[in-house]
């Protein structure tokens, strides 16, 4: 249903519920292993990681298909150092080349159809220099994270910068064919409840390896947690580090 909240409020709500954490530390440290890199942040959202990467001295292009998220990112300190583009991987400039491409905050799962996922990997592969790196995260379906996304476990109340009080919670349908429908419920200042549903793809380790190999990547590492744990013994993650062969 259409949201009664403004785009700015929705972006602020996202930021309130998604603060800097150990996954951000991981991505920033990875990028910063290569000083003065040209970085593509695909699915950059409201720019939390994009701006941190730019502040660390890298040249950054942030791409996202949500114009409200991009507008929120461009209002933040340091935004002038980033090139912001409204779109998907198809909007990567043809002439651009990158040393590193990142997809953070499980954005890879939001690309939920196989065709779109294959095109995304192909577009990134084209844009990377030989030897260029791709790193992203996806939740391990074996951990069944969706079973914990219940109203009782996810209900939160946030105060937005404009003073609005928003109560939000999520619920999920059962996993079907690797897809999970996620519905967010919101009450802003006690108004009528509104909902927004998205679909996430839960790809297995074998699927990710196959898809990356098909797109021309070589997988360097695949971790299960942000401290480098093995898959299945970490935090329910599939953290992928791959490169485009020279």
Image (tube, helix red, strand yellow):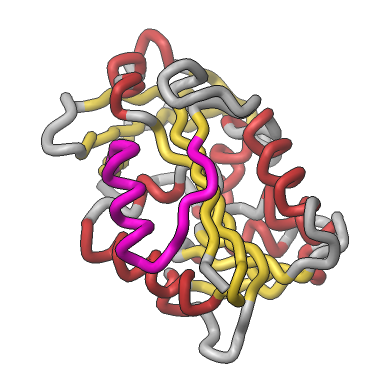
Residue 10: x, y in percent?
51, 45
**Farthest left residue?**
176
Above or below residue 202? Residue 56 is below
- Residue 74 is left or right of residue 125, and the answer is right
The residue lying at 59 percent from left, 75 percent from top is 130
Decide if residue 194 is on the left or right side of residue 227: left
Locate the C terminus by quadrant: bottom right
In the displayed structure image, the side of residue 48 where residue 121 appears, left or right: left
Residue drawn where x is 31% and y is 56% of the image = 211
* Residue at 12 percent of width and 33 percent of height: 176
**Quick check: 207 above or below 19?**
below
* Residue sticking out furthest to the top: 152
Q: From the top left corner, tell me how far across and down residue 134 is, in percent.
A: 55, 58
Name which quarter of the figure residue 36 lies in: bottom right
Residue 227 horizontal/vertical position (percent): 65, 25
191 sits left or right of 44 in the view: left
Kindly identify the residue that appears in the image at 73 percent across and 36 percent down: 25
Q: Nearer the viewer, residue 193 or 75?
A: 75
In which quadrant of the rendered view does residue 204 lie? Answer: top left
Extent of the magenta region = 201-222
Q: Is residue 200 magenta?
A: no
Residue 18 percent coordinates (x, y): 60, 34
User: Residue 218 in magenta?
Assistant: yes
Question: Relative to 118, is 223 above or below?
Answer: above
Q: Is residue 54 above or below residue 179?
A: below
**Residue 75 appears in view:** yes
């Amino acid at each position: 249903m259409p949201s009664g909240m403004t785009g700015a409020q929705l972006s602020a709500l996202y930021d309130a519920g998604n603060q800097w954490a150990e996954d951000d530390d991981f991505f920033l440290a990875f990028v910063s292993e290569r000083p003065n890199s040209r970085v593509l942040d695909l699915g950059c959202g409201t720019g939390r990681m994009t701006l941190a990467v730019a502040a660390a001295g890298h040249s950054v292009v942030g791409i996202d298909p949500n114009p409200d998220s991009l507008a929120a990112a461009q209002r933040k300190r340091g935004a002038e150092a980033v090139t912001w583009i409204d779109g998907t991987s198809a909007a990567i400039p043809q002439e651009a080349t990158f040393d590193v491409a990142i997809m953070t905050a499980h954005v890879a799962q939001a690309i939920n159809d196989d065709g779109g996922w294959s095109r995304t990997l192909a577009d990134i592969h084209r844009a990377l220099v030989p030897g260029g790196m791709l790193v992203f995260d996806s939740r391990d379906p074996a951990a069944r994270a969706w079973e914990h996304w219940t109203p009782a476990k996810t209900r939160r109340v946030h105060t937005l910068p404009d003073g609005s009080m928003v109560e939000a919670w999520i619920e999920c349908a059962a996993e079907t064919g690797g897809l999970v429908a996620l519905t967010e419920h919101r009450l802003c200042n006690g108004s009528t409840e509104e909902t927004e549903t998205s679909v996430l793809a839960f790809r297995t380790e074998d699927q990710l390896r196959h898809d990356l190999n098909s797109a021309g990547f070589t997988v360097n590492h695949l971790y299960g947690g942000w401290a480098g744990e093995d898959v299945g013994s970490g935090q329910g993650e599939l953290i992928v580090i791959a490169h485009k062969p020279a």
